[in-house]
Image (tube, rainbow, N blue to C red):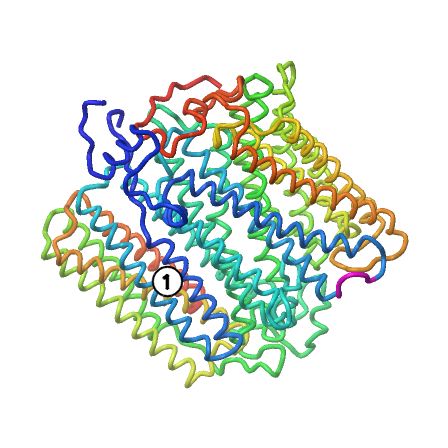
Amino acid sequence: MSGGSYYVPATSKWPILGSLAMGVMMVGGGTWLVHGAVGSPLMLAGLVGILAVMVLWFRDVIRESMAGLYDAQMDRSFRWGMGWFIFSEVMFFAAFFGALFYVRTLALPWLDGEGAKGVTALLWPDFSASWPLLDPPDSRISGPAETLSPWQLPLVNTLLLVSSSITLTVAHEALKMGERQATHNWLFGTVLLGTCFIIIQGVEYYEAYHHLGLTLEAGIYGSTFFMLTGFHGLHVIIGTIILASILLRIRKGHFSGANHFGFEAAAWYWHFVDVVWLGLFIFVYVF
Amino acid sequence: MASLPPKHRLQSSAADSAATGQHEHHRPRGLMRWVLTTNHKEIGTLYLIFSLTMFLIGGVFALVVRAELFQPGLQLVQPEFFNQMTTMHGLIMVFGAVMPAFVGLANWMVPLQIGAPDMALPRLNNFSFWLLPIAFTLMLSTLFMPGGAPNFGWTFYAPLSTTYAPPSTTFFILSLHIAGISSILGAINIIATILNLRAPGMRMMDMTLFVWTWLITAFLLIAVMPVLAGVVTMMLMDINFGTSFFNAGGGGDPVLFQHLFWFFGHPEVYIMILPAFGIVSVIIPTFARKRLFGYASMVYATASIAILSFLVWAHHMFVVGLPLVAELFFMYSTMLIAVPTGVKVFNWITTLFRGSISFEPAMLFAIAFVVLFTIGGFSGLMLAISPADFQYHDTYFVVAHFHYVLVPGAVFSIMAAVYYWLPKWTGHYPHLRLSQWHFWLSVIGVNLTFFPMHFSGLAGMPRRIPDYSLQFADFNMVSSIGAFMFGLSQLLFVVIVIMCVRGGKTAPAKAWDGAEDLEWTVPSPAPLHTFEHPPQYRPVEH
């Protein structure tokens, strides 16, 4: 360390373009929500802009990494950065899990008259608390007819995601031993498992909307169900895209047995998404 | 070390440019220099300029409020607009002025204090900054939207902010998302910098208190900004997609909003004060010409405050109808915070004890911080007493409390930091006489504004109402006069900073004779690139 010097990267135009694209997307999205369809082209343009900036920004980083510009210290900065980013994601999901637990264990029983306060029970005297909540207090809000059984598609999805974490670990071990063909194949399997998960989740949503009356508008059960599984599904989609990009890099001959943080970061993210799913399976589907 | 060849092109070009002064061949010039910069000093400057701009805009909103409250009755603005002003004042000051000011100071000073050449992730740093002007342009634009800007207070409680909100609320939510992304990325960068880029030989317990407090603040930011993102997302869904998170009719609960908001909001309070503690802990030893008393206890106290900050959120909600056990738990846990905070105040005082004290402008602001922040801390203890809070809640007493910790607390510490480090940034000392005028006008103005609010609050004057009953007229008139005095004297601050950038008494590398930290070993003004080769750090025993 003592003889080394720090790495200072060159300037880049991607951050400012990314900020502008983010602004365009948010203005477009807000306009779409408040004033209707006029905003959607703007929102899509912003989204495409953000995706383009991400591709180009990562391309620069990959090029610099391949050129050997990054030292061990830069590698550690990336590791801290990715680790804390995943922690921030954990806290984002924690907010939604917190909402779920609060509603189930406190808010609904209180609405039913439990506890010393009791006055909330006067709002809807006929309301009785239950979970899943099929009959919301206000009759203008219709709850779901029934909820999804955890032991059908959700169980399949659990098996898919858990095995995808295993195949990813096997791919990582293969990469460390320099067996690139095996790495490629196991990683390809992981991407396939992720894709299957997304498709099955889509089927499940279709079922929920068209046969069960389980929608975003179906009271607090629908709200927590779709926001938790929806944000998780979004993360699976993002994780699958990341893993697919890593697969492309493996094909191009990137990464070495000793130096492959891009791969590891993707794996960290994927395992995080897997752990969130286990929480969802237990607290949203089973109990 | 010098004989080693540069490891790569970028580094050698940067090293060459440093060797030939501050000139660089490929650097963009003019506006693009600022738009594309990845330099921690330039980004720090951008943050500070942005923060000052927001401080003045948010200040104007506050003066609209105080002008309306100068006399009882409705004089100047419609009640609807008054609500928008109180809301936007709070949002702009919290998210646009105080937080970016501390991030700007961290950008400038953390690398200099740990002997790093820059932030760990410089391009991400540029991204973090440029998200802010976009977020706040969007937030301010809600003032011109049909139905007006958000009008439900800076805490945006549901259902005021969902069922009964103006249409612009959706845009406000999205702007808060952008600002939140900026904060999270900035905090990740600061943590990575502190953990990974310290000069060889510098242990964690060798770091200055400013670096320590920022490390802990960054942790708090990463922990709670996503919760804010979550709660505003729930609002967005309730407003636009028919979910029932905060709608009891669908089985949700408006109180859930308050829990989630304050789980973010209380650590947020410490996000705005821990870096202030760090600044004061650096400035007081310099001008007392003594080492900081109780360095290790300061670090542990900061960490304790951060941990406790996750366990006290419901003290903002004592009157919402919590179970008794929750009232008690949150009352006692809140009072516990007085212990580590007391450790800090006593350490500052003990550092001053038998010091060889001089009263430079930075020191004036730091000492005023210790006294006036402590007043705010004590009124906080009063508010922590749950049964008493039933009287204080939503009165001007609360307004007095949090303005004492935020204005002569956080804002004074930022002023102190600016006066302390301006010689390092510009190479010039700020104008002494004008700085002293600025200090005395500010300290008198701030107390005129906020001290009477204790009395009007205890007597029952409610917050966020544009009219009041006649018996509060005198207190309010004094508050309004003080507010305009404080507000106008900040124009003097702008003048002082501009004068200091343009010229003034030349400052040496070590601008203050009691200053010991690493930033005073580099020239004043600090060249664009510093510590490109890590300095060997010699530990000092604290």
Q: Which residue is denoted by mark 1 in the rendering?
A: A277
Chain under disc 1: A
**Residue drawn at 90 percent across, 55 percent down:** B470
User: At label 1, which amino acid type do we have?
Assistant: Trp
Identify whether B295 is placed above or below A227.
above
- Left-right relation of A230 to B232: left
Residue B202 painted magenta: no
Q: Residue at x 58, y 69 (%)?
A: B168
Magenta segment, prevailing SS (helix, strand or loop): loop
Question: Left of A129 or right of it: where is A177?
Answer: left
Q: Is residue A218 left or right of residue B409?
A: left
Of the pair B417 and A227, the residue shown nearer to us: B417
Residue A126, horizontal then vertical, whole percent: 67, 79
Q: Label 1, secondary structure: give it.
A: helix
Image coordinates of residue B455 in percent, x first then y, are: 83, 45
Can the viewer see residue A86 in this picture? yes
Residue A60 placed where, x, y %?
24, 52
**In terms of depth relative to the viewer, which is nearer, A75 or B137?**
B137
Magenta stretch holds residue B77: yes
Residue drawn at (51%, 21%) of the image: B515
**Which region is colored magenta?**
B74-78
- Residue ranking furthest to the right: B471
Q: How many marks?
A: 1
Q: Quadrant of residue B468?
A: bottom right
Quarter of the image that includes the N terminus of chain A:
top left
